[in-house]
Amino acid sequence: MVSVSVGIFKYSLFRVSGVAVLAILILVLILCLTFTYTNGFQDGSSVAASAIGSRALTAVQTACLVCTFEFLGALFGGSAVADAIHSITSWPSRADLLPVLAAGLAAAVLWNFITKLLQVPSSSTHALVGGVLGAVCAASGGTQYVVWGAPNSIVDATGVWKVVLSLFISPLLGFVGGAAVLCVATTLLMRASVRVNSVLKLLQWLTTAAMAFGHGANDTQKAMGIITLALTALGLSHSYTIPLWVRVVTGAVMAFGVASMVPGIVRRVGSGIYNLRPLHGLATQIASASILVTGSSVGGPVSATQVISSCVMGVGFASRRKGVHWLIARDMFAAWFLTIPCAAVLAWALYFIGFRFLQQFTVACL
């Protein structure tokens, strides 16, 4: 009789533990989708900014176009960026990874909302990387589970090095690319009449779509990488292949976030840095789309806000450098460089405030 009672108790405890761990997984998924939504209104506002700022498309037209191609980018954009994101940590595939991911995601979401209130174009990618690294270091008491990797080259770099190189080199490429595209376009259209502006505005339907596809492919994969880490930690997936339902849900949430774009960020990127005209908007979009699509194909996590803003600066510099509002650009650069350390500190604090207890409970359930 006693042995039967003990067996029933163990079975009940196992069921309670399993339900609790599943609840933590659901929490991670909710935070992941919330981060994707904040990414949508943060970086999605920058994707729409040049088309709206140059008056090539209306706000409604831009939102519909960007939402559609963000979703398509999530579906058909591959998985190279997701591989780069989940390769920055070597935490064993165990359930105790879930509270760590939750702390990192909560910090990234909080930072995105803070910058939204301040209407500062920040980087959601920086926030996610900083949050995950801060949470991993807090939970492990060191950096033993951080995969630093090696900066062999921009394309072949691994671990954290690959992410950092992608994030900090892409704005430089954006600045140079924006200036170069404008110089080539100006030379080709030197003898064109004012009527060419109508053609340039029509072309922005294509370039804005390409830019949105690149952003959707790149940024949704960051959330997908975290979700596959969580599924693998619970043994619900035995590989890092992204399930179709993850792509569909993440893409839909990203599109919804883009539809909630922040007018203040649109104004800052679209007209606050430089007063864009149709040719400037087209040059910005060609350079931005090239970098975003290339980054997605080679697995380089890039920040759409950084890339697009840098392209606008490059276009303005090549057109009339005195017309660039460098003070606004300075504030944006300051926000970018502060994001990783601030998100890391937030994640560290959030872990010790509440997520450490979840992790201790999860370890007890193993």
Image (cartoon, rainbow, N blue to C red):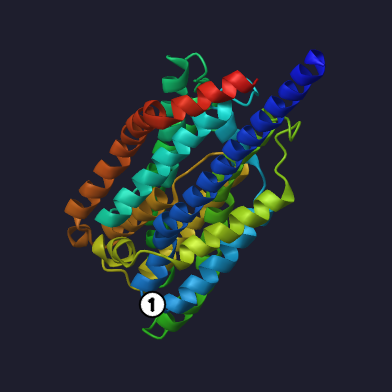
Question: What secondary structure is marked by label 1?
Answer: loop
- The spot of residue 34 in percent (x, y) is 49, 51
Q: In which quarter of the image is residue 159?
A: top right
What's the residue at 30%, 57% (across, down)?
Answer: 318
Location of mark 1 (residue): 191
The one nearer the camera, 63 or 232, is 232
Q: In this view, does 194 lie above or below 297?
A: below
Q: Is residue 187 visible?
A: no
Q: Quadrant of residue 278?
A: bottom left
Q: Residues within 10 Å of mark 1 (few under 14, many from 20)?
A: few
The one nearer the camera, 282 or 101, is 101
- The spot of residue 312 in percent (x, y) is 34, 58
What's the residue at 39%, 38% (across, down)?
Answer: 107
The one nearer the camera, 156 or 330, is 330
Q: Is residue 110 left or right of residue 286?
A: left
Q: Is residue 19 left or right of residue 160?
A: right
Query: Tag count in the figure?
Result: 1
What's the residue at 38%, 83% (across, down)?
Answer: 193
Q: In which quarter of the image is the N terminus?
A: top right
- The spot of residue 297 in percent (x, y) is 62, 45
Q: In which quarter of the image is residue 192?
A: bottom left
